[in-house]
Amino acid sequence: MAAKVVRFAEAGQVNLRPGLLIGNTVADISGRHPTIASFLGNCPDGWDPELSLPNGAPTFDSAAVRFGPPMDPGNLVYAVGANYRKHAEEAGLSVPKTPVIFFKPYTSLVGPNEAICIPPVSTKLDYEGEMAVMIGKEATGISRAQARAHVAAITILNDTTARDLQWVELGSNRIVDWFTSKALDKSSPLGPHLTSAKEIADVHNIRIKTSLNGQTMQDANTSMMVYDTWALIEFITRHATLRPGDIIATGTPFGVGGFREIFLNHGDTVRIELEGIGVLENPVTRSAGTRST
């Protein structure tokens, strides 16, 4: 089975560390690679999916560990707004003339099967299924043609949005408040693992499907993005340096709940399927837990 990269903790432990997941076995690789970024130093454009479990590394049954968001706390999530035409239309927006980029902090993330926490400040939290890519080596001023060589892995992000906190008045203008609507603690699942970019023939021909309590809400293909992954990398690196382990979430397709008054509630389950990558499923709660690092 293909080797995936995860961050995990044993039962009863809090701190997450890098691991290699093969089938139902997790190998602790933190002795050699204390961060995911250090692991990517050997495979900036993706690792061999046929990697074997490293000799001498402690191993665990995957059912006996807890998986967290598969990225290092020191890295950034670069997220993209209105990057699918039909989603921009459902939000009452035009397609942006250049990519719209914002950040999500690590504190907003949870791992697979961990609860999405609806905060006291919002009653209208919305799901957004997205393909996300992880950068494998430092990138500044990268051209579109060079971009592919800088992507090491693919994963899934549920880029939740508090619709009741999304807009603010600034003088006579109405603008998006990316911070309060997108950065809420423990609100956005990432995972379930990192899949090597070498496993995926074309990141721009992948089906993405989001369901809420078993009902399909979003069903699209990454070919429908306005700005594809390579264009996003080119744009971002004109303005800022991407580092190994940084993630770019490439935007959500049509079908979010907020523009038809469907919001997440305590007890819900959100499931995002990304073809060839896996499934990211999370319960929803209004209670907060202890943050892992």
Image: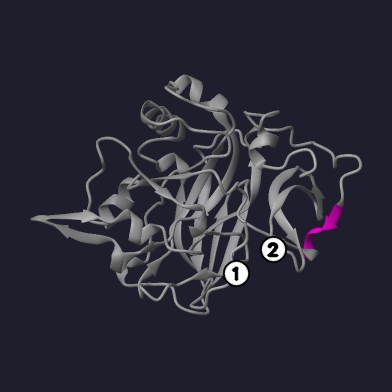
Which amino acid lies under the numbered mark 2 shown in the image of this protein? Val
Which percent across, then down, holds residue 211? 50, 65
Marker count (numbered): 2
The label shown at residue 249 is: none
Q: Quadrant of residue 265?
A: bottom left
Which percent across, then down, holds residue 1? 79, 45
Q: Is residue 228 left or right of residue 41?
A: left
Q: Decide which of 216, 65 is in the foreground and name it.
A: 65
Q: Quadrant of residue 291?
A: bottom right
Q: Is residue 143 left or right of residue 33?
A: left
Q: Main secondary structure of the magenta part?
A: strand
Which stretch is magenta? 59-63
Q: Residue at x 29, y 50 (%)?
A: 88
Q: Residue at x 74, y 64 (%)?
A: 13
- Crowd rating for badge 1 (residues with CA inside 10 Å; few <14, some 14–19, many 20+): few
Which percent across, then down, holds residue 35? 67, 42
Which percent across, then down, holds residue 76? 49, 44
Determine the secondary structure under disc 2.
loop
Q: Are marks 1 and 2 in contact (CB under 8 Å)?
A: yes
The label shown at residue 290 is: 1
- Residue under circle 2? 14
Does 240 appear in magenta? Answer: no
Q: Decide which of 121, 203 is in the foreground and name it.
A: 121
Q: Earlier in the sequence, mark 1 or mark 2?
A: 2
Does 61 appear in magenta? Answer: yes
The vertical placement of 118 against 35, above or below, is below
Which amino acid lies under the numbered mark 1 shown in the image of this protein? Thr
State the quadrant of the C terminus.
bottom right
Q: Residue at x 69, y 63 (%)?
A: 14
Q: Label 1 vs label 2: CA separation?
A: 9 Å
Q: Residue at x 40, y 31 (%)?
A: 240
Q: Is residue 285 left or right of residue 225?
A: right
